Image: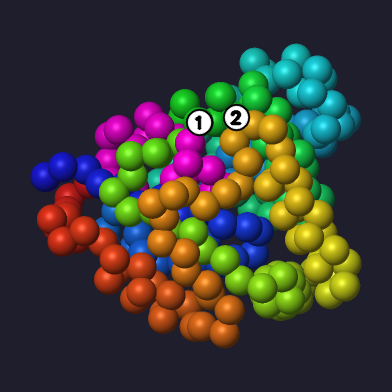
Amino acid sequence: MKHFAIAIDGPAGAGKSTIAKMIAKKLNIIYVDTGAMYRAVALYCINHGINCRDKESVEKILDQIEIKIQYIDNVQRILLNNEDVTDKIRTQEISQGASDVATIQAVRIKMVELQRNLAKTVSVVMDGRDIGTHVLPDADLKIFLTASVEERANRRYKELIQNGIECNLSKIKEEIEARDKNDSCRECSPLKKAEDAVEVDTTGQTIQEVVNRIISLIPKQFDTNNDN
C-alpha cells in the first residue's frame, strides 16, 4: 500500500492540531505536529537567554539542538536533546517564540528535513503553516483550516483556563493577530493557502463536523485501514 499524506495548514488557533490528531487516530496513521518542533527550538533559545528574533544568535546554537520525535500509542512526544519537553512547550511565551524562530531560514531548513523524512516512511497527517505549499507540496490532500480571530481567541482562552493558566482574552486576541501577521508576512515560507488546497472554515462548527468533512475529501484510492 502506498503511503499517503494529508497536509493541514492554517493560522494559529484554527484547530489544526486537535483535528489532525483525530483524523490520524481514525485513519490509524501518524500525526506530525510540526509546530511542536519550532516550539522546541524556541524553548532552547529562551532557556539559554537567546532572543528568538536574533537571527545570528539562533543560527549559532542550532548545532546544539537535537530534536527527536517518538510515538507512544500513536501520540507524538517531542524530545529536545533527549529530554521530553512535550508539556513544557505549550505556554504563550513559547508560542510567540516559535513564530519568531520560524522566520529564520536555517531553522526552517533543519525542521523541514526532519518532517519530510518522516513522510517518506509512513502515512501522515501533518499540520503547520507551510505544509501544503513547501514541506509536502505533493501531499495527496491539502486542507487550509481557518476561523475568525474572535473564535480562535476564545478557543485559546478556554484551553488555557481549563489548564489552570491565568490569561486575558483581549491580550490573547492581540497575540493571535500578531502571529497571523508574523506568519503571513515572513520572507521564508509564509503562511498561505496552496492553490490546490480545500479551504475549511471551522467558525461555528464542531470538531467532529470538521473531521468528517476532511475525511470525506480523502482520495478514494487510499485505504484508510492502511498499516503505516
The answer to if 128 sits in the magenta stretch is: yes
Using the image, tell me which numbered label, if any, was put on residue 112. Answer: 1
Q: Amino acid at mark 1?
A: Val
Where on the picture, by quarter, is residue 137? top left
Residue topped by disc 2 = 108
Left or right side of 101 for 226: left
Residue density around tag 2, few if under 14, some if 14–19, many if 20 or more, within 10 Å: some
Q: Using the numbered discs, state the Cα–Cα distance from disc 2 to disc 1 in whole angstroms.
A: 6 Å
Left or right side of 79 for 125: left
Q: Which residues are magenta?
A: 115-134
The answer to if 43 sits in the magenta stretch is: no
Q: Would you say residue 44 is visible in this rendering?
A: yes
Using the image, determine if residue 60 lies above or below residue 128.
above
Query: Looking at the picture, how far across and down is residue 212, in whole percent?
Result: 34, 76
Query: Looking at the picture, how far across and down is residue 187, in whole percent?
Result: 69, 33
Q: Amino acid at mark 2?
A: Arg
Nearest the viewer among 30 and 109 is 109
Dot 2 and dot 1 residues touching (CB under 8 Å):
yes
Residue density around tag 1, few if under 14, some if 14–19, many if 20 or more, within 10 Å: some
Mark 2 lies on a secondary structure that is helix
Residue shown at 57%/84% (left/top)? 204
Using the image, tell me which numbered label, if any, was put on residue 54. Answer: none
Q: Quadrant of the N terminus?
A: top left
Nearest the viewer among 105 and 118 is 105
Residue shown at 47%/41% (left/top)? 133
Residue shown at 67%/36% (left/top)? 102
Query: Looking at the picture, how far across and down is residue 118, in whole percent?
Result: 37, 35
